[in-house]
Amino acid sequence: MDDSDRLKGLPTAPFLAADIGGTHGRVALMCASAKDAGHVDTLAYRVFACAAFPTLTKLLEAFVDAEVRVPVKHCVLACAGQVLGDEVLNDNLPWPIHLSTLRDALGLDEVAVLNDFEALGYALDGPLAEGGRHLCGPLAPSGGPTLVIGPGTGLGASVHVPGVDGGFVLTTEAGQMDYAPNSLREREILAHIAPEGGYVAFEHIVSGPGLLTIYAALCALGGEAPQLTTPEAVTTAAMALADARAVEAVEIFCASLGSFTGNLAMAFMATGGIYLAGGFLSSIFGLLERSAFEQRFLHGRSARPLLSQVPVWVTEHGLHGVQGAARWYLRHGALETVVPRVAGATP
C-alpha cells in the first residue's frame, strides 16, 4: 500500500492529536479547516491527569469514549522522549508508551510521534504567537528565529526558523545542559545537590520538581526541615510571602530561568522573540515579573545589545501543543510516510 492510498482522506477526516506531558495529557479531535488552508479546527478537547490512568492507551480510550462518535484511524502524539523500537521512553512520563499496543487497542491505522516542544514550535503559526503576557524587551519582535521554552515536569525548548512554506522547527535537549550557578547562593545549592561534583542538568533546577529541589536545599542549608512538599505549595507560599525559603527558592528559580533563556537566545540568535510556555509560569507571572529574570537574561554578555531587542512573553500551554501537533501532521503526515519517529528529530 503506497502513501497516497494509506493517507487518502486524511486532510478532511477527523484525527486524534495528543500532547502528553509528565502531569497532564491534553487530547483533541481535530480536522483540517475547510476555510483556512494549513489551519486546523478543534472538534473536541479535554485535559486529563496522567496519574489517573495506568497507561496512555487508557487515557486516550477515555477521550474516545467521551468525545468520538465516528471511527478515527489516525493519531499524532506529541511527547518528550525517545522512540526505542516500539516504545517512547522518557523519565518525566508516568508510564512507557507502547505504540503497537496503542494502535491495536484504539483500532488506528498508525500513530505519528513528534517532540512536544516541536509541536509548540509549529503552534507559533497560530494562536500561540497571538497571546501571552509581555515580560521584558520590546513589545514587537524584529523577525528571525523564535524560541519556545517551557519549565514544567521537565524543561523543554524548541526554535522556529522562518522560511519558505512556514519555515521549520528545531527541537533540542537543552534542558539537559549543565547547570551553571551565577551567584554564591546558587553555588551553595549546587554543592548541596551534588556534594561530590559531577553533572547537574538545568532541568534539575529550572522545572517544577527543580523548584522543590531548590527549596529543600535552602532549608537544609539553613538547618531547617522542609515544611512544603510540592512545587505548587512553594509557589503559593512565595506569593503569600508566607515562607522565606519559598520566596528565595522562587527568586533563584526565576533568575536561573533568565540565565537559561539568555543562553538559548544567544545560541539561536532568537531575534523573533521568546515564548515561555506553561501554566506553571503563568501562575507566578507577578513573581517572575519582579524577579531577576531580565537582569540574568541580559547580564554580563557581549550580546547584551542584541538581547535587549528580544521580546519575551509568558503564555499558557493550553491547547497549543495539540494544535501544533495537528499542524505538523497535516503539513508532513499527509505528504510523507507516517511512521514512529525519534521524538525530537527534525522532519
Image (cartoon, helix red, strand yellow):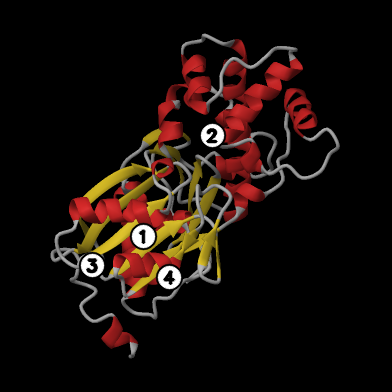
- Nearer-N-terminus badge (4/3): 3
Residue at x 80%, y 30% (from the top left corner) = 191
Tag 1: amino acid: Ala
Camera-nearest residue between 85 and 294: 85
Which residue type does callout 3 highlight? Val
Does the CB distance between marks 4 and 3 fall below 8 Å? no
- Say which element carries label 1: helix
Q: Quadrant of residue 11?
A: bottom left
Neighbours of disc 1 within 10 Å: few (<14), some (14-19), many (20+): many
Residue at horizontal 48%, vertical 36%? 137
Which amino acid, by three-letter code, is at mark 2? Gly
Does the rendering let one see residue 290? no
Distance Cα–Cα, label 2 vs label 4: 32 Å
Q: Is residue 244 left or right of residue 59?
A: right
The residue beneath circle 2 is 208
Q: Earlier in the sequence, mark 2 or mark 4?
A: 4
**Which mark sits nearer the N-terminus, 4 or 1?**
4
* Residue matched to label 4: 100
Measure the alpha-carbon separation of dots 4 and 3: 16 Å
Task: Compute the Cα span from label 1 to label 2.
Answer: 24 Å
Reading the image, the residue beneath label 3 is: 72
